[in-house]
Image (tube, coloured by chain):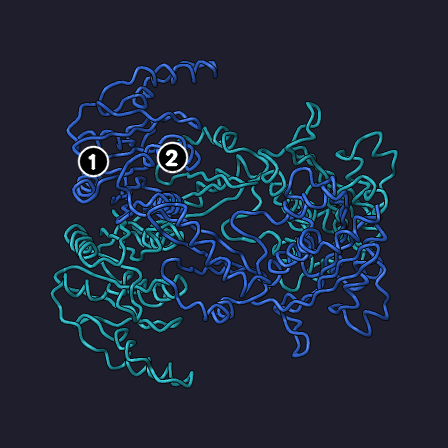
Chain colours: A blue, B cyan
């Protein structure tokens, strides 16, 4: 089954906004085993849009349009589709009622212009819009399928999930399904990941894709197969082989949120934490508190960017700073002990490092970061060498810190027992 | 002058990566007065790519392709263009030499397959690639222009700037030039901005575009005119009218980086700052330290998420917290005074607020944020009501905080004199 996507909107042609529909629909259709062969972006121009939709219907079984469902005369997508399919436009009474109710709830009368939002090509199945006022439509005719979706991403995604995916799933004769799993690594550059995975060959199905982001490398393991169980098994098998070779660098899998995972573990174990940050300067605290309810386990912390504050706020001895430097195991451990003492938290976390661009030396290069974790009985200190420049080093430090916490709280049973033992 | 963009690459069709070329080229061409009428994304399929490029050349004066210039047999863009234009492929000796040298510098011989990167449609002007190995090409034939660009964004942008923009600039008969200016607002929801700007009408040229992001509303003022001076004047005129109506909410203009502006002001005035954060929990500190060299004026701070830490680390009296609450003018001011005293900085900054989703009341709703700024002689406290939910409230607080600092240090001369007076 072959599909084409037709995005409408002058703002896309002018480069005002990035086309998130291309990523979302491309990926969702691939997962369903539907091959997208062409994407076209066209403005609010009747002739050109007609030419594009006609061409798409000649080549492909499924055409999905986005945008152009608003009430103004610029919004012509449904009319153009109707013209190409030689269908008259008719009013959908149920949609009209809902529009009237929508405006009534806001205490105003529906502007006459909005009637357009309730008009559809004859025979269309109207797709309800739970996040906005413009319904979509699905038309089956002459062996082809046309799906008309709204432009706002929230509305489009909700409609795809509620109405379009279930419809496409029941069509026989789609292609292989695609399954994927994303492994997120930190503390290692992309070329070193490739080097370590060389022995796996360059598999095609299941396959491996790389994406570098500041502070992380994303590995996308994917497989396609006629049935999802088989595809899942292929993904898991290759993901397992990958984890054996680079598992120590994985800090998150799929859409797992490390600060949420760590927060849940802390809450379940009844532990509190506080943090002393130098090079990350508040980024770890900010990430902890992105999670609503984080005040149950996260007390706060200090940003000790200057040496003076390291001494003053968390009691790092001036001699330690003098003798070993601000970026050293000794300073990191003193910071972790200090913040734990000052705040009275169960765990004390500290990060100090050289983010660059300046301040690196051959012995202590940019990217050298120490992460220390103190509990009542134990002190861990990790020495990291993070690739990239300032932004990548800082984000990489945060990612690595949450990986260290996850290991301490979840995987490393002994350590977590020690920690819980104190309460 | 009408243009079409043809993006090649299966990864775009599969939704693996977002198409940043569409935004970059769309916007750059619009600025040059060239109208993009259609964008097409096609995979590594010869027939379909040929059909797309042929169609584009029939409709438009300028066709720009991206991607498919690598050495493998998947990389067919140049060959397809040559076939459509009925031009033979020839080897470009200079490019071949450069490729050989590239590999020699790495101590290896050029793989035979790489010769493909030095082959071009006959008569093409070869565009050097300063960021990679695959040169691009520019072909003028039969009154049409075809530009062939590489896929990696860094390479594409460098080549566009170095070779393509200068070439397009000298073509007569392009359309109007487009000029734009982006005003970034915080502390006000989009509908309220529209309401305040209602009296300007809905101008078309110069025009106004809206974009909402967490913690901010972006206003894009744009104008097109035959010459850039006139377009600039139109933009400035409308931007001035907008600033008169909503200027108090503007925290940055164009690609101005507020933390850099504030940092430069602090450094020039010889002032240091430290920060006590509650609801933003390290985000202001993290933003300050995104700027390399920020240690010259930013000392550090505390994240006092719990009430206990507010008392313990910055000395907020327990009675103040009890009587007025953690989110109050009194607490914010005590935090600002406290962090200034603890760190010995010239300025003490404090942020406390209700980020949600929980914790709001009718009197103190989600979005209520206090920002206090203490110097030796003065205390400012700002009460903000930020729209949106947790993420938007937190980012909005950070944006508003930098706006307050900018006003204090730059615009409000009296205040900054007070601050500098102390040294």
Q: Is residue B125 above or below residue A93?
A: below
Q: Quick one: label 1, few (<14), some, or many (20+) residues within 10 Å?
A: few
Q: Quick one: label 2, few (<14), some, or many (20+) residues within 10 Å?
A: many
Query: What residue is at 18 percent from the left and 45 percent from the top?
Result: A59
Quadrant in which residue B296 is drawn = bottom right
> In the structure shown, which secondary structural element does the residue marked by tag 1 occupy?
strand
Q: Earlier in the sequence, mark 2 or mark 1?
A: 1
Residue that label 1 marks: A144
Residue that label 2 marks: A160
Q: Residue A181 shows which numbered tag?
A: none
Quadrant in which residue A34 is drawn = top left
Q: Is residue A304 above or below residue B362?
A: below
Query: What residue is at 26 percent from the left and 48 percent from the top?
Result: A38
Judging from the image, mark 1 belongs to the subunit labelled A
Foreground pick, A20 / A249:
A249
Q: Is residue B122 above or below residue B58?
A: below
Q: Please provide percent x and percent y for residue B274.
A: 75, 53
Side of A129 relative to B304 (left or right): left
Side of A382 relative to B100 (left or right): right
Residue B274: tell me if it is visible.
Answer: no
> In the structure shown, which secondary structural element does the residue marked by tag 2 occupy?
helix
Side of B238 relative to B9 (left or right): right
Quadrant in which residue A349 is drawn = bottom right
Q: Are marks 2 and 1 on the same chain?
A: yes
Foreground pick, A127 / A70:
A127
Q: Please provide percent x and percent y for residue B123.
A: 17, 72
Q: Please provide percent x and percent y for residue A212.
A: 49, 61
Residue A72: tell me if it is visible.
Answer: yes
Judging from the image, mark 2 belongs to the subunit labelled A
Foreground pick, A139 / A115:
A139
Q: Please provide percent x and percent y for residue B272.
A: 75, 57
């Amino acid at each position: 089954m072959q599909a084409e996507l037709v995005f409408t909107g002058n703002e896309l042609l002018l480069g005002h906004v990035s086309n998130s529909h291309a990523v979302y629909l491309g990926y969702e259709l691939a997962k369903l085993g539907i091959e997208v062969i062409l994407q076209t972006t066209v403005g609010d121009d009747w002739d050109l849009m007609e030419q594009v939709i006609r061409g798409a219907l000649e080549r492909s079984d499924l055409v999905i349009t986005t945008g152009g469902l608003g009430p103004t005369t610029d919004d012509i997508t449904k009319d153009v589709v109707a013209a190409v399919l030689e269908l008259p436009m008719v009013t959908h009474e149920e949609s009209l009622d809902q529009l009237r109710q929508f405006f009534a709830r806001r205490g105003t009368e529906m502007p006459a212009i909005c009637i357009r939002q309730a008009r559809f090509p004859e025979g269309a199945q109207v797709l309800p819009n739970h996040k906005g006022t413009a319904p979509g439509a699905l038309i089956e005719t002459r062996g082809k399928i046309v799906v008309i979706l709204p432009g706002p991403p929230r509305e489009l995604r909700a409609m795809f999930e509620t109405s379009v995916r279930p419809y496409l799933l029941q069509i026989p004769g789609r292609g292989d399904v695609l399954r994927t799993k994303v492994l997120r690594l930190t503390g290692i550059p992309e070329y070193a990941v490739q080097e370590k995975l060389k022995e796996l060959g360059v598999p095609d199905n299941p396959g491996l894709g790389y994406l570098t982001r500041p502070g992380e490398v994303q590995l996308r393991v994917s497989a396609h197969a006629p049935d999802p169980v088989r595809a899942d098994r292929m993904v898991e098998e290759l993901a397992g082989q990958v984890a054996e070779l680079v598992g120590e660098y994985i800090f998150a899998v799929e859409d797992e949120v490390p600060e949420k995972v760590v927060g849940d573990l802390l809450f379940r174990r009844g532990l509190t934490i506080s943090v002393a940050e130098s090079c990350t300067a508040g980024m770890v605290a900010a990430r902890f508190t992105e999670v609503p309810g984080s005040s149950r386990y996260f007390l706060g912390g200090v940003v000790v960017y200057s040496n003076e504050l390291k001494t003053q706020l968390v009691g790092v001895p001036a001699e330690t700073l003098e003798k070993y430097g601000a970026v050293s195991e000794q300073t990191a451990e003193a910071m972790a002990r200090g913040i734990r003492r000052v705040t009275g938290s169960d765990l004390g976390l500290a990060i100090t490092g050289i983010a660059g661009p300046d301040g690196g030396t051959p012995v202590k290069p940019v990217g050298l970061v120490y992460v220390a974790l103190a509990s009542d009985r134990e002190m861990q200190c990790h020495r990291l060498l993070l690739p990239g420049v300032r932004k990548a080093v800082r984000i990489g430090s945060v990612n690595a810190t949450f990986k260290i916490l996850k290991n301490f709280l979840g995987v490393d049973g002994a350590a977590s027992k020690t920690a819980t033992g104190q309460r």
